Amino acid sequence: MPNVIEQLSFGPELAGVPHLDQYFGLWALHEPYAQFLLSHAQTINLQLHLEQHAASGPGDRRAGSYYVDDNGVALFELTGTLMKHQSSMAAGTSMALARRQVRAAMRSDEVKGAFLYIDSPGGTLAGTSDLAADLAAFAAKKPLHGYIEDLGASAGYWLATPAQRISINATGLAGSIGVFQVVEDWSKQAEAKGVQVHVVRFGAMKGLGTPGTPVTEEQLAYLQQRIDSFGNDFVAAVAKGRNLSRETALALADGRVHKGPEAKQLGLVDAVATIDEAYHELLAEIKKPRSSQRTKAMSDNTTSAADTNQPKAATLAELKEACPGASSDFLLEQLEKNATVTGAIKAHAKCLADEKAALAKENADLKAKAQAAPAKPQRGNPPIGGDAKEEDEASESTDAIEKFNSLVEAKVAGGMARDRAVQAVVRANPELHAQMIAAANAR
């Protein structure tokens, strides 16, 4: 029997009644695909389309069917536009059908783990959180590894987050964390045609968006509140699934997609790999004793033993938060080492301690030199026509000290610790530093 990779269909066949009502809900979809769906809907011959599919009957008939290979690996495919039910308007995946597959595989003794294959721009909010919950339940019981090939965006990425491990191909894109809704105001066009539209309503928000009526600020505020609520659900799912702080997940929720290596650096995925490498990584996990298999924490307050044994590399955002004031060179070094947050904090503390010790030694050396220097004789007022050169040198020495101190104070005013500010000025101005030491010795 071939493995699950050879069973990928790369897009399920269209089936069933179009389920047109689904298209009018909220979407978590990468914008270019949303524009394509809109243009497709505007050009389709809807009557002919309905006639062609009327005889097909209800969709989602393959209740619970899924593929399992000789290794006990089940294949779950999430490809194309994700919708609650299959639709003939766009090739994609029924999330209702996927839920039945996940639940059936979770109950089956034949299934030892699952490979979650994703190549999707996202889809409707309807069905997404429910499927994500079923995937999380599966991952709590059996190994679940996700693989993003080319695109795991918006709802497509949301559904990857319950997996204990997410891999992506090198040129793949992940992210597009966000939710959007479009509402059009056609009131000016209706006014230009001399048409006045009245909405007789019971409920302030009923009839919102009716063509020909203006969209009020109150209505926009209501829509924004609703979108924010769903967006916060998305952020919470990413934070929980990827073991990130809410602040870190929220910072990633800007709608952008990120290429494989960048997605790994940001903590959106665990590895950049080929599909075969990801599959064999899952096999290795399945073959581990059950007690050592890494499972996702199902609450914010629970961490598995395997998570403790295999600490996760920190993201750039986590490093910045954990190591305030750290230089870009230090942050880059920690990323290259795949350092954990705890490891980075220890390294940062050592770095600060080393800098403080070096500064203390330098100050001690400076003080020792000043004490060892012979005292200069007191000078009276120089006679007219006396040694003006000595006066210039003394003035330059005083200027060097004042300039050095002013540079340090500027950095301290900018938020840098004083010991680090002195160290930074020393590195950037070695000649001025030497002049300052000479001036201090002369005093």
Image (cartoon, rainbow, N blue to C red):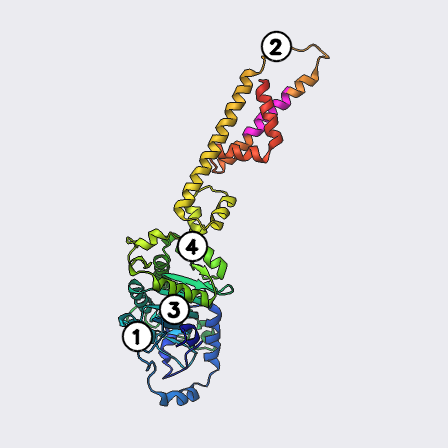
Q: Are marks 4 and 3 in contact (CB under 8 Å)?
A: no
Q: Which residues are magenta?
A: 394-405
Give the alpha-carbon distance from disc 2 to disc 1, as whole Å: 96 Å
Is 401 covered by the magenta stretch?
A: yes
Residue depicted at x 63% and y 21%: 395
Circle 3 sits on which residue?
Answer: 116
Look at label 4 and name its amino acid.
Ala
Residue assigned mark 2? 377
Give x and y (percent) for residue 427: 57, 35
Q: Residues within 10 Å of mark 2 (few under 14, many from 20)?
A: few
The residue furthest right is: 385
Percent from the top left, x then y, of residue 28? 40, 67
User: Element type at marker 1?
Assistant: helix
- Disc 1 residue crowd, few under 14, some 14–19, many 20+, Cα 10 Å: some
* Amino acid at circle 1: Arg
Answer whether residue 180 is visible to the viewer in this image.
no
Between 80 and 344, which is closer to the camera in this rendering? 344
Label 1 and label 3: CA atoms lie apart by: 14 Å
Which mark's residue is nearer the viewer, 4 or 3? 3
Q: Residue 328 got which mark? A: none
Real-space CA distance between mark 1 and mark 4, rounded to the nearest whole angstrom: 34 Å
Q: Could you tell me residue 286's position as x and y percent?
A: 34, 64
Q: CA distance from mark 3 to mark 2?
A: 85 Å
Foreground: disc 1 or disc 4: 1
Q: Which badge, 1 or 3, comes first in the chain's sequence? A: 1
The residue lying toward the viewer, choosing from 364 and 434, is 364
Residue 16 occupies quadrant: bottom left
For label 1, the residue is 100
Tell me the number on the disc at residue 251.
4
Q: Quadrant of residue 209?
A: bottom left
Foreground residue, 222 or 169?
169
